[in-house]
Image (tube, grey):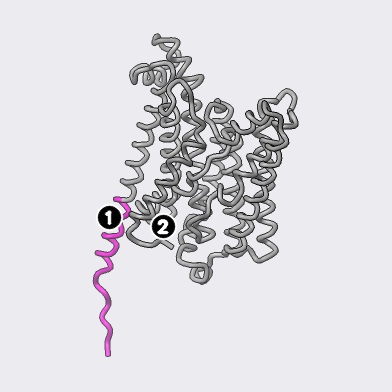
Amino acid sequence: MTHSIPKNRPQDQKDYSSLTNRRFGVALAGFMLVAMAAIADMLIGPSFLNVFDVLAALIDADGAGDPMAVVIVHDIRLPMTLTGLIVGASLGIGGALMQTILGNPLASPYTLGFSAAAGLGASIAILTGFSLGPLSAFSVPVAAFSTASLAAILVLGLSWRRGMSAEVMVLAGIATLFLFQSLQSLIQYMAAPEILQEIVFWVFGSLLKAGWTSVRVSGSILILGCLLILPNLWHLTALRLGEARAASLGVKVKPLRLRVFAIVALLTAGAVSFVGTIGFIGLVAPHIARMLVGEDQRLLLPLSGVAGAGIMIGASIASKLIAPGAVVPIGIVTAIIGVPFLFGLILKQRRAYW
């Protein structure tokens, strides 16, 4: 008895190439939409600027255009917008990585305690007046970065003792979240009213603290994290097939989880240390990307970053429009729009990914 050889392989390859090209097109369209949203974000503010003023200031900062527009765009609005893009991208990519290595749709840098830990570090620095002397501008960000790193070490330590399983990592992360949130609440209870106001403003999250320093530092960390994750894209895609199947394909699951977890901790600490606690982006952005391009990490991670940046910029625009003349903390806006947006994704999702 003979077996015929399937003759549809070239067609399968053609279909796969066509699908991949469509997904690349979706990613490119998303990038263009975010770029337009970034321009819109720079247009909105107390000082009215039209699109031509902003574009002229971006193209030639030393030109013969309106010097006031150049100062507003380059010294205030552009750093805030770039920081928002970087923070959103970092949290979006971090959320996608966490959901992939843990196989949990609720995993994100926020739900695993990293953001809460950063808030605790900032609160301690503000309460105690911690200062780095000549580098005093970095005092609160360094404290936030340090405690976020401490939270990652704590979760990793607990998980390592129990074999780096996904379930243990999730439980350890949730326990860490509640621990740091309770400690932060204790500090807020002990703080004087004027100190409490400063702590609450930081914890809510705001791009008003952004500057060229935050762009350079957070941007460098984002680039570093992306470079570190590049060699593991195929392994992460294989892991979405299941831990047992990934292991049968040669993927060393436990070392992969350890490496990716450390990268996520780095991305999260770099993102929130300058702008404060930002929630829901790391949870929602990967789901948007997954619905559009599937599980191929070559497309999922970049589009998660684009979606995270888009949500962050959208929240920045909304924070300026809600109360004209004032800026609502962006962390509040992301929470307000994040919850119904997540509900919408759940209701409209046509197929299960988990």
Q: What kind of element bears circle 2? A: loop
Q: Is residue 21 visible?
A: yes
Q: Which mark is residue 295?
A: 2
* First to last magenta residue range: 1-22
CA distance separating discs 1 and 2:
16 Å
Badge 2: residue crowd in 10 Å (few <14, some 14–19, many ≥20)? many
Q: Quadrant of residue 10?
A: bottom left
Looking at the magenta stretch, what is its main secondary structure? helix
Quarter placement of the C terminus? bottom left
Residue type at the position of mark 1 = Ser
Is residue 72 depicted above or below 204 in this figure?
A: above
Q: Are marks 1 and 2 in contact (CB under 8 Å)?
A: no
Q: Which residue is mark 1?
A: 18
Report x, y in % for residue 162.
67, 65
Image coords of residue 277 (percent x, y): 57, 39
Task: Tell me the residue at 51%/31% (across/down).
Answer: 329
Residue 262 picture location, percent across and down = 61, 51
In the rendered structure, which disc, 1 or 2, sits on the residue that comes first in sequence? 1
Specify the amino acid type for callout 2: Glu
Quadrant (top left/top right/bottom left/bottom right) for the N terminus: bottom left
State the residue at coordinates (49%, 63%): 239
Q: Residue at x 66, y 35 (%)?
A: 122
- Residue 93 versus residue 190: which sits nearer the camera? 190
Q: Which mark is residue 251?
A: none
Mark closer to the observer (1, 2): 2
